Image: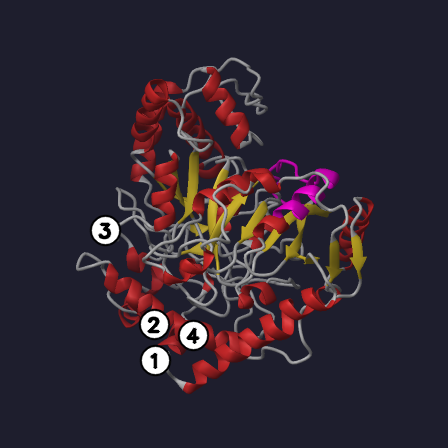
Amino acid sequence: MIERKTDQKVKGSGMRRRDFIKMGSYSAALMAASNYLTPWPKSTVNLMSTSGNDNFFELEEATLTDLQAGMRSGKLTSERLVALYLERIDKLDKQGPVINSILEINPEALTIAKALDQERKQKGARGILHGIPVVIKGNIDTADQMTTTAGSLALAGSRPPKDAFIVENLRKAGAVILGKANLSEWANFRSTRSSSGWSSQGGQTKNPYALDRNPGGSSAGSAAAVAASLCAVSIGTETDGSIMSPASLCGVVGIKPTVGLVSRSGIIPIAHSQDTAGPMARSVADAAIFLGILTGVDQRDPVTAESQGKAHADYTSFLDKNGLKGARIGIARKSFGFHEKVDLLMKEAISVIKAQGAVIVDPAEIEPEERYGDAEFEVLLYEFKADLNTYLASLGPNCPVRSLKDIIAFNEEHRQEVMPYFEQEIFFMVEKKGPLKSEEYLKALEKCRRLSRTEGIDKTLEEHELDAVIVPTDGPAWVTDLVNGDHYLGGSSQAAAVAGYPSITVPAGEVFGLPVGVSFIGGAYQEGKLIKLAYAYEQASRHRHAPSFRPTI
């Protein structure tokens, strides 16, 4: 859930893993799927292969609406849809370009899809997610035959006793959990010199737009899988940048919700003051649809009580092509300047936004003169120790490790497999921290909230009467480097992440063929407003396009 920071101590905190993955369940599922992989006639849903292989069902750029139309018409079933996605995963993720975005396949996916098809015939569809295969990040609990490991071999074989709350929501909506996505190990919170998208369980995820480039982290697999049309939508998680950055680098839409809008129960944590899960999709519309499914008050995550009366079960009412007309949009210039070609894309984005009738306020900075310094990192260190140990204790006696101390020992004992490229410096820092009543922690937390909220986003929005502030989400993807770690130029996730406020990134163009996103940042629980603005920009700019899996730029 952590992307690289501008603060030196956490800059580059991605994870790397050796190409080590046990995909027995995947192989079994694929063999079952082969029974359904017969040529598929063209329909109103444009889902035929463009690869030259008639049996290779592309599903390229298909939306949730497209897929539901296919099932509603009878030209497509959930069972067949799962089979076709499995074939695409085999040919793109595990063979061919070997994107390596999928950590584990659900061996029950075809069975679940078949049951949902039968239910559709008897009772009709539950909603727009009925029968839709989705991918979730590998740190999200499922009480089924899949494991939940955060990409770590220390948790290999761990099967939680209960679904995460958001997984319960997906199942109730009729979604088929196709599998779990690879990620930066421990959500990029193990080492200061890691490669985003690498885990000891899953190896290195690649960027579908240039295979030698990094997909960003920590929700690397979630973003890459959506970008490559291995699923229509996915779930990522973020503590600081881990939805926004990979979404930007992989050319998709990502929504980081307000902390409290989406339950975190059953998600391997970093820090409760900043952690959240959120949707990743190829369009703002699909991300908005998916977000509504994830919301809800959960007794296992008390902070979600704050969302009551502020959350929406359906965000599609905010999809307005004219949503920028009359809106006041601030430009946070301090987040510019790290790459001249990114600045040019932002100049174009501002022109588009202005042409759609928005009032531009430039500049409108969201970061005060006083800097966070080490405050955010201190908060994360303290909360990770408390939150992770609490999570591990909830797994019961079948969990292979019971504490962070156990994980550190496991990593040392299995150094060749777990730490072939980088160490666990952050884990050692975490283990030295005391309880959450420590004065150092409380002072750091107060500083973070004051600078990011009272003197940051809230102040900027109020003083300039803004609907949102825009910033470049990230730079173009860097070359993956397992030796030296991430080469990060700049980005803009910190303010919204530390505040616990929402942000949305939308494709804004390309630099040398590498996607770059623009972020819309707003106040607490203003997801609907941000969706309205981001959708209007997306419809006016139309920068999203499918990747071509080039070996290099």
- Which region of the structure is painted magenta? 531-553
Q: Which quarter of the rendering shows the C terminus?
A: top right
Residue 386 circle label: 2
Earlier in the chain: of badge 4 and badge 2, it is 4
Q: Can you give x and y, in whole percent of width and height, for residue 144 in the image?
A: 26, 43
Q: Can you give x and y, in whole percent of width and height, for residue 28 in the image?
A: 30, 32
Residue 391 circle label: none
Earlier in the chain: of badge 2 and badge 1, it is 2
Q: Nearer the viewer, mark 4 or mark 3?
A: 3
CA–CA distance between discs 4 and 3? 27 Å
CA–CA distance between discs 1 and 3? 27 Å
Residue 435 circle label: 1
Answer whether labels 4 and 2 touch (C-beta < 8 Å): no
x 45%, y 34%: residue: 89
Residue carrying label 3: 161
User: Badge 2 local density, few (<14 within 10 Å), some, or many (20+)?
Assistant: many
Residue carrying label 4: 381
Answer whether labels 2 and 1 touch (C-beta < 8 Å): yes
